[in-house]
Image (cartoon, helix red, strand yellow):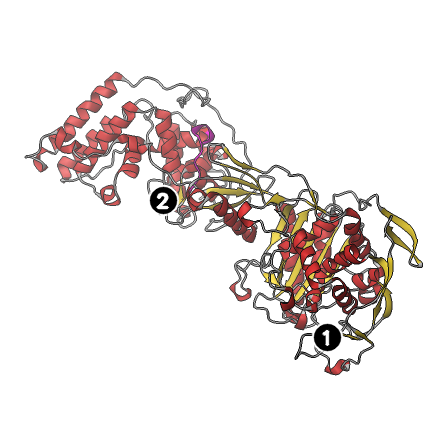
Amino acid sequence: MNWFFRREARTLSRGVRRRFQGQRPVYGDRNFPWHRPRQLNFLRMVLAVGFVSLLLLASFSGAAAAGGYSYYSRDLPSVDLVFNRRIPQSTLIYDRNGNLLDEVYDPNQGHRILVPLREMGQNLVNATLAAEDPNFYTSPGVDPTAVARAVFLNLQGGGIVSGASTLTMQLIRNTLFTEQERTDRSLLRKVREAILAFELATRYNKNDILELYLNDTYYGHQTYGAEAAALQYFGKHAKDLSVPEAAMLAGMPQAPSDYDPYVNPDLAVRRQYYVLDQMVKYGFLTRDEAEQAKQTTIYLGRVQTHFSEAPHFALYVRDLLVQRFGYDAVYYGGLRVVTSLDLQKQNLATKSAQQHVAEVRASHASDAAVVSIDPKTGEVLAMVGSVDFYNDSIAGQVNMAIAARQPGSSIKPFTYLTAYMKLGYIPATMVDDRPIAFPQRAGLPPYRPLNWNFVFNGWVPLRTALAASMNIPAVQMLANEGIPSMIDTAHKLGITTINKPPDQYGLAITLGAAEVRLLDETFAYTVFDNNGLLIGEPLPLDQQRPGYAPYGPVVLKSVTNFRGDVLYQHTPQPPIQVVPAEYAYLITASLMEDQARVLTYGLHSYLELSRPNTAKTGTTENRNDSWTLGYTPDLVTGVWVGNADNSPMIDVAGVSGAGKIWHDYMEAALKDYPKTWFTVPPKIKEGNVCGTHDVYIEGREPVCIAVPLFAEVGASVPQPAAAPAPQGNGG
């Protein structure tokens, strides 16, 4: 055998030469760039009428008491139902560049993609006609010669032993007959089928019939229609099929399971050879072209039993579509959905997550999630929900990008932003990083926060306290500004999950005691990047809440139906200044210097990129979660590492877990971007302030020393050996 099949290989390049000179023409309607159909041959029509009469006469022995034609045509469905019926269609979800991410369909209906006849391609149409009905355009829906042969064999054998079904008769059988009727091999069914086919062919345009046949035929593997089948078996559109590919596909409808090239490659090849020979016989190919096709290697794609590109993102999009358009529209309506995702960045994020989780798996870290957003548009460019969607041992189908988890110190910027706005603090403001105790409500001992390494650094600027992720200064900031103020700030920027009364969180909220979603926190960081501007998609009215961000991340760019009618088009909305630009910039200024992080991370850690950037880590109590979030002027990315079952890791901190993934992904994703600096708001000035050279806000007197409230500085604390693990962590 000269053919061989190689799964999961690249498909053949397009461009098999098409020759039509001297061949039988294939006809099309006014919108299809082929010839117009001939009028039905009068002799064929006469023969067809005679054929129906012959069937009636041949079967009178089985229906002697019947009334001829009325007997066979009684209770026949209307042929109008062939076209006037709901045909389920798959919804197709694409990335921003047209790469197919997902096909959504009801598994009980199979997946199908309706396309007009002009998009079926000459090769597939020729092969189908040659295999199934070479006289399709000149016959009245039935083939008198073939049926006469079937009747003759019927009279000899006492039953239908030869098919004689035209393409039109097959369409009738598949659309108007029940499952029981389709498997009935009696002459009665054949007569009823022929009557309906004759009526359909004389009432409807031939191109419409052929188009519906090619869109509705079963090709195996729950696949209906040539377009879905071409994507299923060859990974390309029907119009792009080569001659050998088209011949193989055209040969399948007669017996899809028998001619399945995955299961029975030898039988599939023999059937394909038959179709190629038929194409020669009826003038669609020359003998040399057919022989060349037989010698051509076909590469099969992988059987698509489920989606394989960005599965968590695809499921997230499904849910959004169902909320907006309803279940039926998504699973039966054939929507065409263009999303914000950049599959190239998605693959980079997946690769980085998988590689580094493999490195820390021995430390009981099994999973990671990544979200990457364009701050200028609010569009989600990457969403990795786990390192392996199909791995049940890590609960891989749980989308950790939208799961609520404790964020550790990655939530501290919201505390510092609130302090900058409410208390007049700036990055140069000095804070006392020493043991401290905060009174709690009656019956509870004082709250004594500790730094992650049990080291106290004395007086430090807020820039260093935030960048090096010191816990005690963060709790002092929160005590001074008030928990409700910090929560309000988080809500304005896009955090959706901190919904309990403030006193249920306590001061530990600034160390990560409240659960957030990676998607939300990454989106909230875009506000820092945008100097206080909220840019995104307006939330549906029923999802908007007072005090919360009215915009969310952009995921859908456009939605059309299969006809091309626009159902939704994302239109950029005016940005909302949710916090003043100068205060948001102070967070960027606090997080962008590598020198400010040195006390915790040392110089040139994974938090430093080859371009201006910010970064903030977070590690939760008992090492359950490792976080890193950071941004450049062009990209905001958040990373989580941990276990879906919330079991602790062993010595995997924010920078050593999520930080490595974040660093490698950001460097790869930004490789082709020019290096740019953050935009400095007009009110931000630089100079001598609070005894040091730093940034400050013009016209506002800075507070140079942050004095803790309601706390006892220098209070005794347990020794490190007996101290509980802190809820927030700098590493």
Do callouts 1 and 2 mark residues in contact (Cβ within 8 Å)?
A: no
Q: Nearer the viewer, residue 221 or 345?
A: 345
Magenta stretch: residue 115 in it? yes
Q: Point out the tag, 1 or 2, that comes first from the N-terminus.
A: 2
Spot occupied by residue 9 in the image (x, y as percentages of width and height): 54, 47
Marks 1/2: CA–CA distance: 75 Å
Q: Where are the magenta residues, as a range?
A: 112-121
For the C terminus, the image quarter is bottom right
Disc marking residue 391: none
Q: Nearer the viewer, residue 411 or 97?
A: 411
Q: Quadrant of residue 272?
A: top left
563 w.r.t. 421: above or below: above
380 w.r.t. 284: above or below: below
Q: Which residue is mark 1?
A: 439
Identified by mark 1, the residue type is Pro
Main SS, magenta region, reads loop
Which residue is rendered at x = 58% and y = 57% of the image? 402
Disc marking residue 256: 2
- Is 537 left or right of 481, judged from the image as shown? left
At numbered mark 2, what does the secondary structure look like: helix, strand or loop? loop
Spot occupied by residue 268 in the image (x, y as percentages of width and height): 39, 43
197 w.r.t. 354: above or below: above
Spot occupied by residue 321 in the image (x, y as percentages of width and height): 50, 45
Instruction: Mark 2: give few (<14), some (14-19) or many (20+) Cα within 10 Å.
Output: some
